[in-house]
Amino acid sequence: MEDEIEINTEEETETAEVDASTIHKIAHSAMLQIISRYLTISEETNAFQDLSKSALVSREDKLIIIGGFHFSLNAGTATKEEILEERNRQAAILIDTENAITSGVYEQIRAYSTSLVDKLFKIWGLYPT
């Protein structure tokens, strides 16, 4: 579904074509990618019982584990050792599959949405501080 958005500025009026299904496509693609990685990590780690068997190198892998176990760590900066230490502290907690997957999906949607807002600010001649 495509909608037209009319943007009025003092200098000119611009009309931008927006594909309303784009965010859905990004979310769907992200879900497929993250679910695939989730299943691979699950196999590698005996259903998340032994995280030391996973490389936990990529940000995506870290985000799946950190989101799934609700760790208070940053996927961009956390090391494998920090993740393993946190897992050992909270060994009784089961992984939250929905949160493990949606953390990465929301992150990708947020990045896309932010880019749209940035474009809008540029069109309006405004820049976020």
Image (spheres, rainbow, N blue to C red):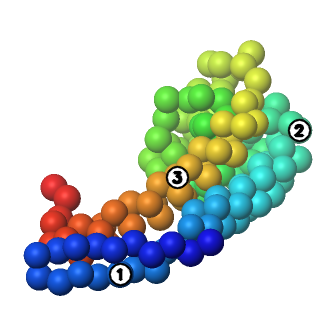
Which of the pair 76/24 is nearer the observer?
24
Compared with residue 12, is residue 108 higher up or lower down, i.e. above or below? above
Contact (Cβ within 8 Å) of mark 1 with mark 3: no
Which of disc 3 and disc 1 is earlier in sequence? 1
Q: Which residue is mark 2?
A: 46
Q: Amino acid at mark 3?
A: Glu
Which of disc 2 and disc 1 is earlier in sequence? 1
Which of disc 3 and disc 2 is earlier in sequence? 2
* Helix, strand or loop for disc 1: strand
Residue at the image position 72 percent from the left and 37 percent from the top? 98
Compared with residue 19, is residue 40 higher up or lower down, i.e. above or below? above
Instruction: Look at discs 1 and 3 and give the one toward the viewer.
Output: 1
- The answer to whether residue 53 is left or right of residue 118 is right
Q: Quadrant of the C terminus?
A: bottom left
Mark 2 → mark 3, Cα distance in angstroms = 27 Å
Q: Which residue is mark 1?
A: 15
- The answer to whether residue 72 is left or right of residue 114 is right
Q: Amino acid at mark 2?
A: Asn
Find residue 114 and report its horizontal and vertical position in percent. 38, 60
* Helix, strand or loop for disc 2: loop
Residue 25 in sight from this viewpoint: yes
Q: Label for residue 96?
A: none
Compared with residue 68, is residue 34 higher up or lower down, i.e. above or below? below
Label 1: few (<14), some or many (≥20) within 10 Å? few
- The image quarter containing residue 53 is top right
